[in-house]
Amino acid sequence: MRYDFTKIIDRHGKDAIAVDGLGKNPGFAPEPPKDGFDVIPMWVADMNFETVPTIPKAIMDRAAHPAYGYFSPVEEYYDSIIRWHKIRNNVEGLMPEYIGYENGVLGGVISVLTAFAAPGDAVLLHSPTYIGFTKCITENGYKIVHSPLKKDEKGIWRMDYEDMDAKLKANNIHVAVFCSPHNPTGRVWERWEIEEAMEVYKNNECVVIADEIWSDLILKGSRHIPTQSISPDARNRTIAFYAPSKTFNLAGLVGSYHIVFNRMLRDRLEAKSRKSHYNTMNVLSMHALIGAYEAEGYTWVNELCQVLSENVEYAVNHIRDYYRGINVSKPQGTYMLFLDCEDWCEENYKSLDELLKAGWDVGVAWQDGRPFHQEYGIRMNLALPLSRVKEAFERLDEYVFHV
């Protein structure tokens, strides 16, 4: 490999809630480990890898000029995004005017909702549900209606199209959030699945918010298909959100973007996002995106996906081989595992809180999955060097599951 994904980096004191935030937000962050154990951060969704070198270089090159005044996005910003989507996702016809800046995907979701729904209106989401969606949608006065994903006979999460259609109709819903790849299950939807979903949304006259922030992190054997590429109707019905933040570990820099082909949808979204005078690009995050989407970035992401695929393969096999009662559906994208611990808890007369705490005590900082609407869920971040992933499971073997 050209890049080193084996290096263990010390993030303490470097503005990382993944390690320094333990114990500081009860109910969200894990508790600190007992004495004698260091932290293996496996909860909040950022990575424990050094990013591609072209990003810090781009930031430092721009920061070297000692003026940071008002600015407009440069042509290279749009060109970088257009080229990225053409090469990686075969997107044709993308123009600069279809691209707009967002401070974050969640803020973009709220801008869409305020443009196309009234306070108190219902929004359709699949469950399990990303905690960020739950918090931002409900805290802004909207009601969430869940359409649960169901596992098929092979343990693969699937959408229930009849349930989606029935709930859209029963609740007069006209805005839906479609997460692709899905967070937290890691499903990468096949073309026919997206086609079916978009047909349901079309028949119910829904504006579709497509969160595709994980779309670069696709594991071996799968391929991301942009929602807007499914059909002319999907292209005109969908507001898609992207960012380099998950792909390149840039969440702390802030900076996402939307792609909207339909002029009416785009005008309403941008009118809402502009009026706060808060949704404004940071000059360094602009140059970080340009650095990320340089030629080296393509190679770096390809190697990253190979590393993540190996990590997921190891973790899933280990769980299935040794942890009776812990059920896991192998993700096809992202770097998160979503465990179903119900059978283990019942067989061992343990609560999920006790299981979580047993891991936290030995430094395995995994995440409570209940806020994602899974009663016995645990979410695990595998974006670490494989040596650290193996060390985490060794601790779970010895102190938690007693393999």
Image (cartoon, grey):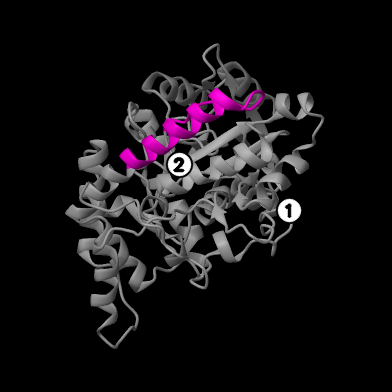
Residue at position x 71%, y 27% in the image: 344
Q: Nearer the viewer, residue 304 or 262?
A: 304
Left or right: 18 in relation to 222: right
Quadrant of res 398? top right
- Kindly tell me whether residue 25 is visible in this rendering: yes
- Seen at 43% across and 69% down, the residue is 280
Would residue 331 be counted in the magenta stretch? yes
What's the magenta region? 305-332
Residue 51: x %, y % from top left: 33, 59
Of pointers 1 and 2, the one earlier in the residue sequence: 1
For this view, does 137 lie left or right of residue 205? right
Q: Give the image quarter of residue 215.
A: top left
- The number of numbered discs placed on residues in the rendered structure image is 2
**Residue, disc 2:** 335
- Of residue 198 and residue 282, the one placed in the foreground of this image is 282
Q: Which image quarter is the C terminus in?
A: top right
Q: Helix, strand, or loop for circle 1?
A: loop
In the picture of the structure, the residue carrying the numbered disc 1 is 27
Please, is residue 135 above or below residue 393 in the view? below
Q: Residue furthest left?
A: 295
As shown in the figure, which amino acid type bears the numbered disc 2? Tyr
What's the distance in space between the residues labelled 1 and 2, CA to CA?
Answer: 22 Å
Residue 227 left/right relative to 292: right
Query: Residue 11 in the image: x percent, y percent?
Result: 48, 66
